[in-house]
Amino acid sequence: MTLVRVELRRLLSRRAIRALWLVFVAIFLAALIGNYVHAGSEPLTARFVSDGGLGFGGAFAALAFIIGATAGGAEWAARTMEALLVWEPRRVRLMLAKVAALSLVIAVAAVVVQVMVGALARLAVAGRGSMADAGEHFWRTYTGNGATALALAVFAAIFGFTIASLTRNTGFALGAGFVYLAVIDRVLVLLPNWIDKFTLFNNVAAFLNHGADVNHGDPVTLSTLRAGITLSAYIAVLFALATTLFQRRDVT
Amino acid sequence: MGGDVVPVIAVRGVHKTYRRWRRPSERAVDGLDLEVDEGGVFGFLGPNGSGKTTTIRMLLGLVRADRGDLSVFDRPMPERLPEVIGQIGALVETPLFFPNFSGRLNLELLSDVAGLPRLRVDEALEQVGLADRARDRVKGYSLGMRQRLGIAAALLKRPQLLILDEPTNGLDPAGIREIRELIRSLGASGTTVFLSSHLLGEVEQVCDRVAILSHGRCVVTGSVADVLATRSTGELRVRVGDLAAAYDVLSAAGFRVARDGDTRLTVTAVAEPATVTATLAERGLYVSELTPVTVDLESVFLGLTQDEAADASAETTT
């Protein structure tokens, strides 16, 4: 627990993470205003509130990936990992503490983002529309969407962290994320149909949108549960690999 | 108990070769044997690339040995390092800190890992003379200040074993002197200080014992006096009124004598300096100066490491 507390303090003291937050809040406000304006003169409904969080879920997951990558890579860039290991030589424990602290920060931030989005969307609806259609499922949908976005953000952060830990480099992790989404995922879609069920992009889309049809070849529906399990399996494998290598490799 | 003294550090037959992709392998440590007893200051010397830092990294569990055994406080490393890490303070090469954090925050984060009280951070900062700049960001620190902060981090745990790798890097002469005094006082107070340094004059002043490494092997180890004695030539400088007469007398008595300018003679391979005085006095020649020519650690170091380099080169050729 002490280690997690120390890692939390280290993470929250970092200027890069504070700066990323500011950038995200600016983008968030701009997007919200843009969305409101884009809706034109049509009256807004309760759905504007319950679905609002989902839209930001994807963007927040991207931010979480960057924060995860910088959390994993900065220790290697500043070579402070070496100093830290002279204080805590149990590497697996250290790795788990770092991931726990990162997950906690991202989860709390995701809740804050969801509440902010919900509150601002509610204000927008109050100004131009009505919550009259908010049925008994409103809160379940709203919290369900929020929880999905939160889980995706935590997944993304751990992804970024493990790739940066594997390569001991933030830039490599960010580059790998970009290359995967821009090139590899698109190439994978051209391969045999069964691969569609396993691509990262399809699973993220299915997870965030509560299921999605993979339309290449024979349509297959990926459920939220199945997408969540697939994403969890990817993270577990990557994290196990990163931890094993961290345990075995020299720190020079 | 049998009264056996267990060394604080024991290294036996340790080998380490770095294997890097698309680059030739680099043998850093080649069958190193070393023992460091409790208390005092132990100098760990060797030219660049002789394996000093790799050995320190292996002792701290940062690098894994290919073969051989290492132990600290009688615990095998790195397997049982967690049991003794609380008693070890270390500064390895350049101090490593987050540049955008203050010196104090960097130390607090480390001390929190070990659950140390905040007071220790203040004490350590005070000890290295950095209390006034503790709230400044590390990126604004000079090299010497970073070095002081690194030493403060190593002192935080009040360690029983303090491993310092080039602690005076970047320090000005006053800073070097302060750190020298600090190391000396720590060694005298019972802390075992394992000091790796290139400043042989400094090492000679503060260390009780030394080991000299070359090509990953220990070429000599022992007390500073013993190590200096390995290269002692038994050379004396003699000043006497009648230089020519003294030269003749000593030569006739079988001494190897040479003129050293117009005022002194140099007598070599003398086992007992008093025999020179007695020989001259018997002929009415009275010595006004008799100085043993001492070797310093630097000349011993250079002599030993050059011999080792020549041997290694000869082995490669044959």
Image (cartoon, rainbow, N blue to C red):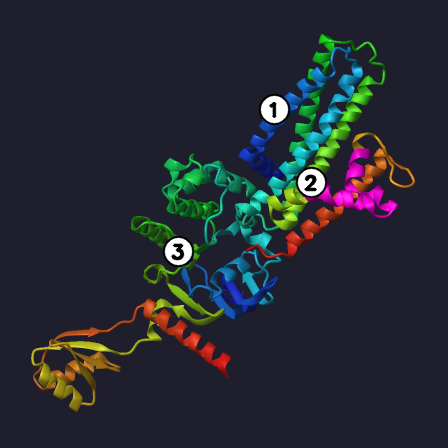
- Quarter where residue A231 is shown: top right
Q: Are marks 1 and 2 on the same chain?
A: yes
Is disc 3 in contact with disc 2, using a CB cutoff of under 8 Å?
Answer: no
Query: Could you say which disc has been placed on residue A26 in the image?
Result: 1
- The residue tagged with tag 3: helix, strand or loop? helix
Task: Describe residue B92's horizontal placement relative to residue A128 as left or right.
Answer: left
Which residue is located at x 33 percent, y 75 percent? B231
Q: Which mark is residue B187?
A: 3
Q: Earlier in the sequence, mark 1 or mark 2?
A: 1
Q: Residues within 10 Å of mark 2 (few under 14, many from 20)?
A: many
Q: Amino acid at mark 3?
A: Gly
Marks 1 and 2: which is nearer the front?
Answer: 1
Is label 3 on the same chain as label 2?
no
Q: CA distance from mark 3 to mark 2?
A: 45 Å
Magenta residues, dominant SS class? helix
CA gap, disc 1 to disc 2?
24 Å
Which quarter of the rendering shows the N terminus of chain B? bottom right
Badge number at residue A158: 2
**The magenta segment:** A177-206
Letter of the chain that mark 3 sits on in the rendering: B
Locate residue A234, reporting x and y percent: 76, 45
How many labels were placed on the picture?
A: 3
Q: Which amino acid, mark 1?
A: Ala
- Would residue B73 be seen by someone viewing this image from the given angle? no
Q: Are marks 1 and 3 in contact (CB under 8 Å)?
A: no
**What is the x, y in percent for residue B146?**
42, 45
- Disc 1 chain ID: A
